[in-house]
Amino acid sequence: MTAAYIVEALRTAGGRRNGALRDWHPADMGAAVLDALIAKCGIDPAAVEDVIVGCVSQVGEQSFHVGRNMVLASTLPQTVPAVTIDRQCGSSQQALHFAAQAVMSGTQDVVLAAGVEHMTRVPMGTPTMLAVQAGLGKGPWSGALLEKFGVTEFSQFTGAQMIADRYGFTREQLDAFALESHRRAAAATDAGAFADEIVGLRIVDAEGHETLHTRDEGIRRGASPEGLAALKTIKPGGVVTAGNASQVCDGASGVLIVNERALKAHGLTPIARIDNLTVTAGDPVIMLMEPIPATRRALQRSGRRIEEIDLYEVNEAFAPVPLAWLQELDADLARLNVNGGAIALGHPLGASGTKLMATLVHSLRARGKRFGLQTMCEGGGIANVTIIESLGALEANA
């Protein structure tokens, strides 16, 4: 079986709810990323054999196969097929996995993995809300399923609080982690750390001038312990708040994945090699703990130790998630989300998988580091883990 390589990984800068990207249709936003990937790699668009797109809320402007609509809105020829998938928050990370598996098997040589989520125009939970309003059932879970697990619903908010309770995390610890996420994101932005991964989108600013959106809107430079402490908790008596959880975000992202045959045929230079692809599932009630066993399996299958991983991107869905992951893996906080995470930069659901990959691979290259690991919690108690080897780091360290 041949290897899978990342030739380029790009993302839009995050847009806040009703913010800079409010006027962008999600299909056009995703198409802009696809076009940027093709242009930056210099590959013939007709060489792309498939486009795999992650999206969670597939309704409204993200319905009727948003992946295919992204292709049709892009400069890719209409002969390029697409598929839209949903593995909840890990949707585009799974798109990357499917793309890598395709080129590793040799059934395809060039595949684009991408993700899109416009949470302003298609708010989280819209599919369920619309169905219930239309009288089409009471929601996604059957009575038998809820009875089986002894719950009235499956809630990520409940899961986050359960993790905080299990590990004894205090409100002060979670808020301190959130503040550090904003600090790191601001420092990375000021240093131009995101420049190579961001696709600028044309917008009209508050003064009516056309400009490029190239800076993540969610970073709160003025965040303070006092300000976070004043926020209400999501659950009465809990410690999780909107301030120590990920932000609603509009965004798109993508990765070009190829095998060695494509590298030679198209004269491409890879920036990373896929080292391991892992997905596991566990408890759907606490839900957000699965990155821990998933990471352990990924390390075991890759034959690597956590000490060998130079940087990790663990999605900051809620502060207790990466904090528990750090504790259980005995990992190094200094290597985690070095440019900030979703608490500051936003979590555009289906786009977050390849968004984090764009940040991870470019962060490794910028620091001359070798191995990176990405993981995120997903609805239903699932987690994906991707380990990559930065090829730029090999050149830098040679």
Image (cartoon, helix red, strand yellow):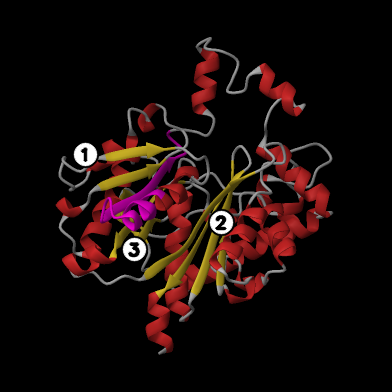
Please state which amino acid type lies under the numbered disc 2.
Answer: Thr
Q: Which label was assigned to residue 72?
A: 1
The magenta span reads 98-121
- Residue farthest along the front direction in this orientation: 1
Please state which amino acid type lies under the numbered disc 1.
Answer: Leu
In 3D space, how far apart are the residues under numbered discs 1 and 2 (Cα atoms)? 31 Å
The image position of residue 387, as x and y in percent, is 50, 64
First in residue order: circle 3 vs circle 1 = 3
Write the residue at 57% across / 65% down.
Answer: 337
Res. 198 image quadrant: bottom left
Question: Residue 234 versus residue 376: which sits nearer the camera?
Answer: 376
Does the magenta run of residues contain 101?
yes
What crowding class fits label 2: few (fewer than 14 Cα within 10 Å), some (14-19), or many (20 or more)?
Answer: many
Res. 392 image quadrant: bottom left
Q: Are the two marked residues, 3 and 1, in contact with CB atoms closer than 8 angstroms?
A: no
Question: Residue 192 versus residue 361: which sits nearer the camera?
Answer: 361
Write the residue at 77% across / 59% down.
Answer: 173
The quadrant the C terminus occupies is bottom left
The image position of residue 50, as x and y in percent, is 27, 46
Instruction: Provide the secondary structure element on which disc 2 rests.
Output: strand
Write the residue at 46% across / 33% down.
Answer: 57
Q: Are the two marked residues, 2 and 3, in contact with CB atoms closer than 8 angstroms?
A: no
Question: Residue 249 versus residue 312: which sits nearer the camera?
Answer: 312
- Residue 344 visible in the displayed image: yes
Residue for badge 3: 2
First in residue order: circle 2 vs circle 3 = 3
**Rendered position, 201 above or below 156:** below
The quadrant the N terminus occupies is bottom left
What crowding class fits label 1: few (fewer than 14 Cα within 10 Å), some (14-19), or many (20 or more)?
Answer: some
- Residue 224 visible in the displayed image: no
Residue for badge 2: 375
Front tag of 2 and 3: 3
